Image (cartoon, helix red, strand yellow):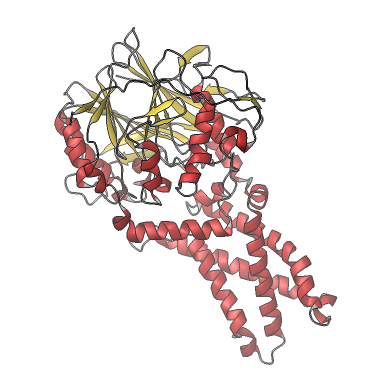
Amino acid sequence: MTDVHPRPVEAEPVLPPRPRSMEPRELGFTPQRPVGWLAPLLLLNTGLRALLAVLFGAYLDKRELQNSLDDAWFDHSTSASEDGEMWFDYVADLGDGFHATYSVAWLLAQPSLEIDGVELPRGRLLMMGGDQVYPLASGDGYESRTKGPYRAALPEPPAGQPRPALFALPGNHDWYDGLTAFLRLFARRKDGHIGGWRTEQRRSYFAVKLPGDWWLFAMDEQFGAYIDDPQLLYFEQAARNVRPEDRIILATPSPKWVKAADAPEEYDATDYFIRTILAPTGAHVRVLVSGDLHHYARYSGEDRELITCGGGGAYLLATHQLPEQITVPPEETLTRNKSRSRVYDLVSRFPDAATSRRMSWGVFKRVPARNPGFATMLGIIQTLTMLAMAGAASQGGSIQRLFTIPLGLMVVIILAGTVLFARPPGASFSHHARHWLFGLGHGFAQIGLAVLGTWVWLRLPAYDWPWPGPLVVAAVIYGPIIGFLSTQLCALYLLIAGQFQVNVNELFAGQGIEDAKSFLRLHIAADGTLTIHPIGIDKVCKKWTPDPDGEPHASWLTPADPLVAHPIEPPIVVR
């Protein structure tokens, strides 16, 4: 076993016919709609998967088993061009709806991008930073939401050129099946490629030596629980090759530096990794990069840049709620041997705060439009509650009215559902009370709407019709109307609660905004200077034209509408 992987020899590919339409049989995969995150079955399924992963994650954790896999690090220091430079790309949180995912993949696959008059060549290495598939990891999910779109964007490398390398770091959605599908796709020993990109890694984490005295370390945290011993041993061996004059880019599955503002323990594993694996080498960690939060944000300090870039295809997440300043590691952490705390300022975000705030008001329109099943579920709950209240009203005394079994059951269902929807954290969390209060407040508001609906129902002529007339009217007329009103009430709750850092994710997940995407194009100059180009896409393309007569390496589908990339901020220079 060698300590470093040599670059593999390329075999002559067998080229498939290029598709002439967007039919699945032509593409070899089925383009997917964006995930409707508030769909009832998806909420239940994802919630159960997440609960099982938390409760039994240690038993499903395949990282310990990876100890038997190849433990070599990867040397791409010779991947520089003749002038000693190297370009590489970073994208995260892809694998959602086809239009957003393919818009980003298409831009990544082009030979070069001209941004503000500057030519930025395609990277010789592509790193996917986490959550390569939504909503749950599976072979079919990866095929239709990740592998298919990226193969269509870059079917083959240009003739006479090596395949660009591809490395992937798992996020929480990749973890829901214990990494089974992830390892099959990204860690294959033979014939590992996704279209024109060649997969090289053998584990869910990796270390890559880059030109110009730079290294890329990518650590895998299983839901932030701990860093397993085989992973620590792997990085300890790789770190023996790191010199004091080297500089390091550390990729993590989630921007713990942001999340630690509310939960200080979130950053402990990252800090431990830096202190015990990287700091002893004498090298400097100059950049931390992550996805998971579906936007672009950069915090800058005296020693390093902290970059979140999760705009690869998943729904947009708010930026106006980001703290303007963070302390990393947090002063409140209980870790006794933590690194020295430093202050980092928020210097850039995409979309900007004003745009993000304006987009949050779209919740009233987009939630019912993007999640018809959610509106239907609320309509059913409201209708059953109204029928229970109407039945209670026909009882004798007031006590009997309040404590009928059907009505009591519906009240419990509503309150339990809204409290769970607010996702109250543990009692140790400093702000746990507000989640409970907002959840209960939302529940009582929904009950109030049911009371109002019952008052109206009791005054309708249909209430006195012979059975089953009232039930038919309730299902056909009352249900859709009250379902829409209940959805609007939920949207109002999300808008208000989001101002207090409650259900911020659901406020934007429910809208499923596909625009405002982002990725990074990075450049290492001959003198070792790293320049990071954050690239934004204001509006994704939703109309594509097949290119059946294109070159083998050309994208199968080209934008029918303009697909414009722009710099999110001026290039970030790191030395």
Q: Residue at x 40, y 52 (%)?
A: 177
Q: Is residue 292 left or right of residue 208?
A: right
Q: Is residue 250 left or right of residue 448?
A: left
From what the image shows, is residue 93 above or below residue 122? below
Residue 49 falls in image quadrant: bottom left
Disc tally is 0
Q: Residue furthest top?
A: 83
Q: Residue at x 27, y 16 (%)?
A: 212
Q: Position of residue 262 (x, y in %)?
A: 37, 50
Q: Residue furthest bottom?
A: 396
Q: Position of residue 388 (x, y in %)?
A: 66, 79
Q: Position of residue 98 (x, y in %)?
A: 58, 37
Nearer to me, 490 or 387: 387
Residue 430 visible in the current orientation: no
Q: Quadrant of the N terminus?
A: top left
Q: Is residue 366 left or right of residue 212?
A: right
From what the image shows, is residue 305 above or below residue 463? above
Q: Position of residue 477 (x, y in %)?
A: 78, 66
From what the image shows, is residue 505 above or below residue 93? below
